[in-house]
Amino acid sequence: MSVSAVARLTRDLTAGLDGAGLEGFYRDLHRHPELSFAEHRTAARLAMRLRAAGFQVTERVGRTGVVAVLGNGDGPVVWLRADMDALPVREATGLAYASTVDGVMHACGHDLHLTWLVGAAEALAAARETWSGTLVVIGQPAEEHGGGAAAMVADGVQERFPRPDALFAQHAVPGPAGLLPHTPGLILSASDDVEIVVHGLGGHGSRPESTVDPLVTAAYIVTRLQTVVAREVAAKDSAVLTVGRFHAGTQANIIPAEARLTLNLRTQDPVVRGRVLTSVRRIVTGECQAAGCPAPPEITVAAEFPNTVNDAVLDVRIAAVHREVFGADSVLDFGPAMGSEDFSRLAPPGVPYDYWFVTSTPAAVWDAVPGADMAEKLGKVPSNHSPLFAPDPVVLVPGVRALVSAALSGLEG
C-alpha cells in the first residue's frame, strides 16, 4: 500500500476506537504491576483479549511471554511487540490508579505499551477484510531484566511461529504528549551490567591494621572509574558509566570481608564498548592489588543489551506514514539515545525492524516546567524509571494508531 493509502485505512480502522475501554485496561495494568518473569496476571489478561479477538494464542513462551497469531490469507508476516514487566520502584505519582503493589511500579510505560498492542491487535482483527497476510502479536517478558527477548528466542519464538518480514515496537518517553520521534539506523545504545566483588579481610573497627578494608578499596574503585569516560573515551564517542549499587558492611564497628558494586555501562560503538570493559577490569584489578586484597576481585558481566539499529529504509517509510496520519510536525529525530532495549534480539537474522518513541508527558506538567526549548524542559519532567513517571492517557489512541499504521504498511491491502 502507498503511504497515503495506509494513512487513510488507519484513520478508518481506528475511527471508532474505544478510548474509555483502552484507558480502563491501562489503569488495571498500572494498578497491578509485575516484575520481570513474574508477569503472570499481565500475560493472562493479554492472552484473554487476544483470544477474544480471534488470535491463536500461545502462552508461557520464554517463561511468561505471549505470542498470538492471526492468519489472514497470503501475504507478508508482521510482528508487533510490547514489553510487559514493571520495576522495583515505589510509586509516588498520587494517581487514582496508582500501583497497589508496594515497591513495584510501571515506571517505564510498559503498561501503556501493552495497551497499545491490545488496541492495535483488536482493531486489525476487526477489519481483517481490509488486509491480507499474517499478524503476530508478542507480549514480551523481562525487558527490564534484559533476558526476556533472549528467553523467547531460546524457547523457539523464531522457529515456532511464522517468520516475520518486519518487526515493530514503540516506547513511551518524556516530551509534550503526542510526538513520534524516529531515527533511521542506530536509535538505542548497548548496555552492560557489571557486577564486582572486592574481597578484603574483615575484622574489628578498632583494629583496622589487622584487616584489608574492602569498603575503602571499593570507594577508590568508584572514584577511579569516573576517569574512564572522562579520560579514556574520545570526545567524538558516546559512553556512560554509572555505579548504581554499592553494598558493604553490617554495622559501624565491623570492617566487612567484602564489598559489592554493580556498574551500568552504555556505549554506541562495539570498539568503545570493548575498551570501556577492558578499562573497568584494569582499574578494579589494580585497586585491589594496591590495597593488598587477599584474593583477586570477581568481575562479571551479568546482563547486556545490544544496540538497537533500525532498518533505515523501513524507518523512513514508517516515519512518512506517521507524518501522513498525525501531521508533518508530529515526527522528529532525537538522534541515538543512551537508553537500551532487547527488542532487536527477537528479529531473525536479516529481518528488518523499526522502533520509535511516543512522547507522553501531560500538557499541564510540560507547560509548568521552565525551559527555553524542548531539550531544557526534558531534563525537568519526570522520566522513565522515576517514581513520578505518569504518562498521559491521552496518548492511548494515538499510540494504537501508530502501531496499526506500521502494521498496515507491512501487510497487503
Image (tube, rainbow, N blue to C red):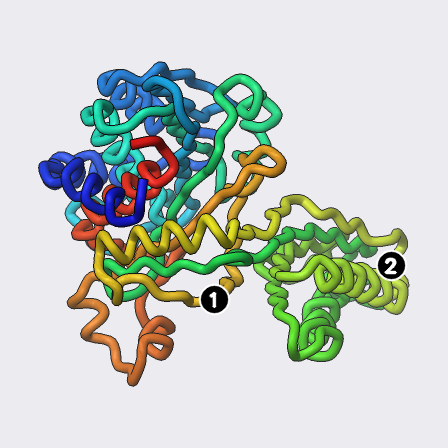
Give 168 or 112, whichever is nearer the viewer: 168
Residue 13 placed where, x, y %? 17, 36
Side of 56 relative to 178 (left or right): right
The quarter of the rendered structure image containing the N terminus is top left
| Amino acid marked by disc 1 | Gly
Q: Which residue is identified by label 2?
A: 293
Q: Secondary structure at mark 2?
A: loop
Mark 2 and mark 1: span between their CA atoms? 44 Å
Find the residue positioned furthest to the front: 2
Q: Is residue 54 above or below residue 26?
A: above
Is residue 383 left or right of 292 when viewed as pictured? left
Location of residue 281 in the rendering, given as x and y in whole percent from the top left corner: 80, 59
**Above or below for 23 versus 46:** below
Pick the residue in front: 15 or 122. 15
- Which mark is first along the chain, 1 or 2? 2
Q: Position of residue 15 (x, y in %)?
A: 11, 40
Viewer can see residue 388: no
Please determine whether, in this image, residue 301 is positioned above or below residue 220: above
Res. 47 image quadrant = top left
Evaluate if marks 2 and 1 touch, with contact meaning CB atoms under 8 Å apart.
Answer: no
Residue at 85 percent of width and 61 percent of height: 285
Crowd band around label 1 with a 10 angstrom C-alpha radius: few (<14), some (14–19), many (20+)? some
**Residue highlighted by disc 1:** 335
Q: Quadrant of residue 80?
A: top left
